[in-house]
Image (tube, rainbow, N blue to C red):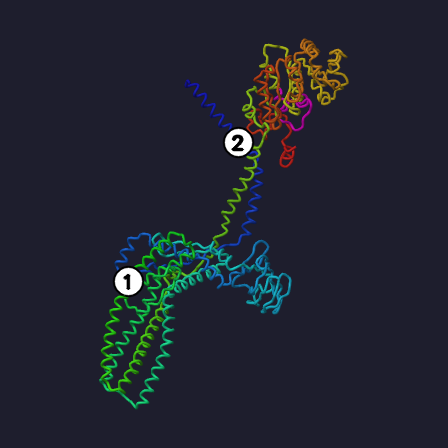
Amino acid sequence: MSINDLSSQLVKDTIENEVSFWEVSYKYIRNWKWFAISIIIFMGLAYIFAAYQIPQYKVETDVLIKDDKNSVGGNEKDILKQLDLNSSNKIIDNEVQILKSNTLMEKVVDSLHLQTNYYVRNHISKKILYKNKPFKIDLFKSNSESYNTTWKVQIINDNEALLNGKKVLLNHPVETDAGLIQITPQNPKGSLYHYIVYVDFMTVAEVAQQYIDKLNIDPASKDATVLIITLEDAVPQRGQDVLNKLVEVYNNAAIEDKNKITSAQLVFIKERLDGLAQELNLVEKNVSNYKSSNSITDVSAQSQLFLQNVATNDVELNKLNLAEGSIKNLEQYLSSSDDDKVNLPSVLGIDDPTILGLVQQLAEAKIKKESLLRTIPETNPVVSSINDQIKSLKQSLLETVQNVKQGMEITRSQLNNQSKKFENIIKSVPSKERGLIDVMREQEIKNNLFTYLLQKREETALSLASSVADSRTIDVAKFVDKPIKPVKKVIYILFFLGGILVPFLIIYLRELLNIKVRRRSDIEKFTKTPILSEIAHLDEVAPLVVVTRPRSKISEQIRVLRTNLQFVSPEKERKVLLFTSNISGEGKSFVSLNLGASLATTDKKVIILELDLRKPKLHSTLGIENTTGLSNYLIGKVNYKDIIRKIPQLDNYFIITSGAVPHNPAELLVNGKIEILINELIKEFDYVLLDAPPVGLVTDAQILSKWADATMFIVRHNYTVKAHLRAIDELYQRKVFKNMNIIFNSVDADQAYGYGYGYGYGYGYYDEAKPAKGLSKLLRRNK
């Protein structure tokens, strides 16, 4: 390809792209009024939508989560924790899930009585009542209508109120359509006392889920253990109460979990003290009775010292028995396959630090597992990891318990040997003194054990009272006065874009679903048949526009068509032109009639034949009598000269009307008479115009085509179906018609985007009627 060819092709592609862009843009630009109307409507809807929205406020609180729950083990533990880079994140994630659990939120909702909503309505939106509600309604017993109906309540006096129009008593439980309720006035002198207040009852679980959905919890940073808890609420005071109560319930739940082991141990000690107190009372009575019956006031110093040593040995033996009992219970627990038990057995009397540390770790692991199971399933990998940790701790604890148990057996043997020595010594004491020592020995044992248990009870109670949560509130709930929703600017922008998008989509879909020819490019896309001329659309059409309105735009386009005829069969001075179309109504009669009139104004002698013998229209359009015509000639009833009539207003323009409608038009056209007629007319007239029927309905046009020098195929804008263009192209490719050309008729400049360059010099050049404006133009276009 040469440089010139390449340059020409580049220029051609540029022009086609510009035209295509203009055509695409013009179909939207010309409908700017619809865009304007749509934007106005959508902006009105945006105003109404924004007015209906209930403002939402953002409430926030900050909570510090302590991550040193398991910090037993000193610096070695800290070093190991530093190696676990994700340990802190795992703790934070668990606490987030706990804070968002249904269990905690349901406690919050129930504590604040949020399951009942109160609000009043104005002309557009509604206002939610919280602290300022004039009354409180308690729903004691619900029915099928309680949660499905909005109840209208209005206090009418100090003793009665209206519930959906029915009177109910105040301050008393009453059975109503809403169930068993009680209405209690709270602010009798308030401004809303006699207003209608709307009440919605909801279940605690339903309200809790709504707040969970609005709750957002995020760490302050990647490595921080500070949680930023935010909540959106229409009533900022209510949002503050919800967050503060949530943190309070969360801390209480954490303390309850931590105190489970301590509480169980305290219960065990109290039960043991109750039984021991009864035994001690009985022993003290025995001592007193023995002294009274034997008149003993005191024992010797040697016996007293001996008694103290015996009591000390017995106390140690009792402590060992207590510890062995705890060890036995712990061993049974560890050997059991039931892992669902959270409360471990009491470790009272066990002083081994290894066992105590392992028990503490095992208890915390089980509490952590229980907390996780509130939010995640048993199959979660995190739970599986904790299960493995619990299993490992139980195994280590069981081994340690067995070792400690062996040590206790050795200690028991030593204490028993010591007791035997003391018993041998007791035998050498006088009988009365020996009896007193026996009863006092038992008293001392019980008393020391009772004192020991009292000390443990106080220590356990102090531990229980000093338990604190593993979190600390940094900032109590607060809110910003300016609502975060609705964002009116965003609403107006979205509705504005919607106002543009809706007409855009309608126009686009209308074009996408359009099956009619609207552009010259549509014709060029489906057929290679040459387009000889384009004729504009005219709302008020006269039969002979070129005569009645010679300076009109359409008259000028007829003249252009007349000029273009010199390129059709240029070798012939006298021409026979055939006019046809695919279907009726595409304007072939109008085009042929006005083209003939335009030719006649140039001193050419023209005749037009009304060959649509089935549905003739030309004679009625021109107001010419049609008693005899072509049909009479074709059956040999008249001579052709007898049926030639002059068209009014033009000296060189004649017509042969169709005549009576025959029952066999196609047979008349092939009897040879039409050929004779055309040959005779071409001798006398410069142009013979054949106004033939549509080719898509009958074969008349194809029969007449062999006597025509050229065929003018009429395609009408926004009327001809695109599929018909394929039939036209097939006729052109098969050369059914000689010198076949297309005339694009009735092109509406306002609808055929981009056609202004074809014939639009502006309204000032032609003698045109002023264009319609506003609604009249739209109505005319629709018509």
Q: Which residue is mark 2?
A: 24
Type of the residue with mark 1: Thr
Residue 255, quarter of picture: bottom left
Q: Does residue 160 appear left or right of residue 486 in this picture?
A: right
| Residue 252 visible within the image | yes
Residue 187 drawn above or below residue 380: below
Q: Position of residue 254 (x, y in %)?
A: 39, 62
Residue 229 is tagged as none
Q: Which residues are magenta?
A: 537-558
Residue ID at (47%, 62%) = 107
Residue 116 drawn above or below residue 418: above
Residue 546 in magenta stretch = yes
Where the C terminus falls, by quadrant?
A: top right
Task: Kindly state the secondary structure of the residue where label 2 is placed.
Answer: helix
Residue 765, quarter of picture: top right
Label 1 Cα neighbours within 10 Å, binned few <14 / some 14-19 / many ≥20: some
| Residue 137 visible within the image | no
Q: Does residue 63 appear left or right of residue 413 in this picture?
A: right
Label 2 Cα neighbours within 10 Å, binned few <14 / some 14-19 / many ≥20: some
Q: Which residue is mark 1?
A: 400
Type of the residue with mark 2: Val
